[in-house]
Every structure is written in structure tokens, then in C-alpha cells.
Image (spheres, grey):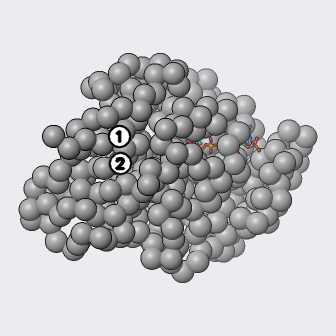
Amino acid sequence: MPTMQAVQIRQYGGDEVLELVECPKPSAGPGQLLVKIHAAGVNYYDVKIREGWLRQFFPLQFPHTLGNDFAGVVEEVGEGVTGFQPGDRVFGLITVFHGGTYAEYLAVDASLVRHAPANMPLDEAAGLPMVGLTALIALVQLGNLQRGQRVLIHAGSGAVGGAAIQLAKHMGAHVVATCSACNTDFLYTLGADEVVDYTSTDFRTIAKDIDLAVDVIGGDTNMRTFEVMRRGGTIAVVLRNDPVEMANRERLCQEHGVEVKVVAFDTWPEGLDTLRELAEAGHLHGNVQSVFPLSEARAAHQLSQSRHARGKIVLKVV
Ligand SMILES: NC(=O)c1ccc[n+]([C@@H]2O[C@H](COP(=O)([O-])OP(=O)(O)OC[C@H]3O[C@@H](n4cnc5c(N)ncnc54)[C@H](OP(=O)(O)O)[C@@H]3O)[C@@H](O)[C@H]2O)c1
């Protein structure tokens, strides 16, 4: 039986449970593509899955191959699939129930796959799906962002924040973003108009009359965000609800005339088409700042869980 390398876990736990293993190579079933993975995105979500924080919603069957984002090349086209040929460059996002992308191959429903941006190396394309779709959902679907509006993006130096800055700027917004001092220049290169070093300056002194805030931090940052919002504005929250925040939220929404909307994980293949178009037009870059080989998935997770990674982390498979 042909085999492949993959990074799997056999139990929930710290980064020590990540194992590089030899396991059966899948093949494309009906309606599927077999993709030879070139790179897989590493998301903080993967750390949460590995640690078991999300087991109530996404119980795993072990061994489980981690990873949701991928970019690679089609190797086999399953029965009934149209629109793809062997050799096509593709990218996509899967849920934990579809398998994992920290692997040499992935058999994936063709409906979840799209052609990768023609102008983008596959390592970079692998970093786009989860964070690019999250940013699009926050800014467009939930935030209904309009040209000229004022946007506050927390953690602009992170993967979601970096995608959100680029997209909001492209949409004609005035972008205020937060990060620590070492990353301020980086945020201006992504397109931010104003950057606040959250370690020395309270963003409330700079961010005013915000129409839409994208919050991936939560807690006290979320509470203070209400104070900088224009009445009628929206806070798009990109993380699972914290009980303290939820208890205060209704009161704060009424007090400040603000709506809070929660961004849910979504594989959204049509959104991938939008990301490809934006990337091909030069409006969105993968923002990959750290590349690890598959064998160093543990180091990649350590960087992600530090919560101070800059831009996107990917695992290079080929
Ligand atoms: N709901 C969904 O569908 C969805 C999808 C994607 C992600 N998420 C969640 O969204 C969160 C962010 O993901 P991510 O991939 O963007 O994370 P990330 O890349 O790990 O974010 C790291 C960045 O956060 C910055 N940061 C840390 N503390 C900060 C603070 N108090 N204020 C401002 N910036 C701060 C750091 O900047 P400095 O180093 O400069 O401090 C660092 O650059 C995670 O919890 C993730 O699980 C949810």
C-alpha cells in the first residue's frame, strides 16, 4: 500500500503530541480530488484543536492529521469531477471532519477546492484561505464595510489582522491598527493609515468614531473597543465568546449603540474565488513571514501559541 508522511496526533495535548508519521496515502474517491500538498497554513485554530479546547464542538477521531488550509497540485481527478485537470494549482480550506492538511497528500471534495491565484507561489497561497476568508467575512459579510469608513483592526501584525488591513485598505477604508512597537513599520507597509503600539498607548486615545472594529483579542481589549465606536457601528469578533465578555456585551451594545457580530469558521469556496481575484489584481498578499518544513510542525505550533507571530506561518511540504 502506498504511504505518505503526515503530522498527526493520537491524543489531545501540548505540542509534544505532534508526530511525523508514515500513513496510508489516500486516493481520490467519487467527487474528490487528490491534491499533492505543497504547503499547509498553520493557524492558532490548529493549536486549539490539538489542545482539545474545541472538542465539545469538533470531537476528533484519533489518529488525527492536523491542518485546514492547503495549496498544492491536483494529482488525481475523481469520478464525476469537472473543472480540474491533473497538474492544476489549487488551494482551499477543509474542516477537521474532512481530514488534515499537514500531509503530503489530501483527498478532498472538489467542491471545497479552487484554482490558486496564478501570480502567487503555492507556499503563499496556502496561507490565505482561513485568514483571508475570516477577514472577508468580518469586513464584508458582517461589517458591510463602505468606502471612507473608519476601521479599527486589532492585532494587525497577526495573520487575520494582516489580511484585514490589506482588504480594508483596498475597499477604501481609513485603517487604524494595533500591534507592538517592533511591528509598526510592518503595518504601514500592509496599508494601515494609523498604527497604535498597544504596549505603550491605549488605542482609545487615537481610534475615534470607528464604524467597524475587527477584534481577534477579546477580554479587556474588547470592552475598551466599545468606547471608540460610532453609534450604529459594528464590532466583528473573531474568536469564541469569553463568558465575561458575553455577560457585559448586551449592556455595552445598548450603552454605545453598537452591534457585535461573531465570525464563524466557514470553508466558503466562493470566498476563495474572491480571494484569488483580489490576489491576482495585486490587492492581497499571502503575508507569509515564517516557513517551517513539515518535520518542524512542533516549532511552528510553538510560534503560533506564543501569540506574537508576525504575519502568516506555513508548513512547507514539498
Ligand atoms: N472564527 C474564525 O473563523 C477564526 C478564523 C481565524 C482565526 N480565528 C482566531 O482569531 C485569533 C487571531 O488569529 P491570528 O491567526 O490572526 O493570530 P496570530 O497570527 O497568532 O496573532 C498574533 C499577533 O497578535 C498580536 N497581538 C497579541 N496580543 C495583542 C494585543 N493585546 N493587541 C494587539 N495585538 C496583539 C501580536 O502582535 P505583537 O507581536 O506585535 O504583540 C501578533 O502579531 C485566534 O484566536 C484565532 O483562533 C478565528
Mark closest to the chain's N terminus, 1 or 2: 1
Vertical placement of residue 267 versus 61, above or below: below
Amino acid bearing label 1: Gln
Q: In the rendered view, does 27 fall on the left or right side of 138?
A: left
The N terminus is located in which quarter? top left
Determine whether label 1 and label 2 are within 8 Å by CB: yes
Q: Secondary structure at mark 1?
A: strand
Q: How many marks?
A: 2
Does residue 193 appear anywhere in the picture?
Answer: yes
309 shown above or below 111 = above
Does 9 sit left or right of 74 as displayed?
Answer: right
Q: Position of residue 116 (x, y in %)?
A: 41, 69
Q: In which quadrant will I find the C terminus?
A: bottom left
- Neighbours of disc 2 within 10 Å: few (<14), some (14-19), many (20+): many
Q: Residues within 10 Å of mark 1 (few under 14, many from 20)?
A: some
Disc 1: which residue = 5
| Residue 306 at x, y percent in the picture | 67, 32
The residue at 65%/54% (across/down) is 289
Residue 104: assigned label = 2
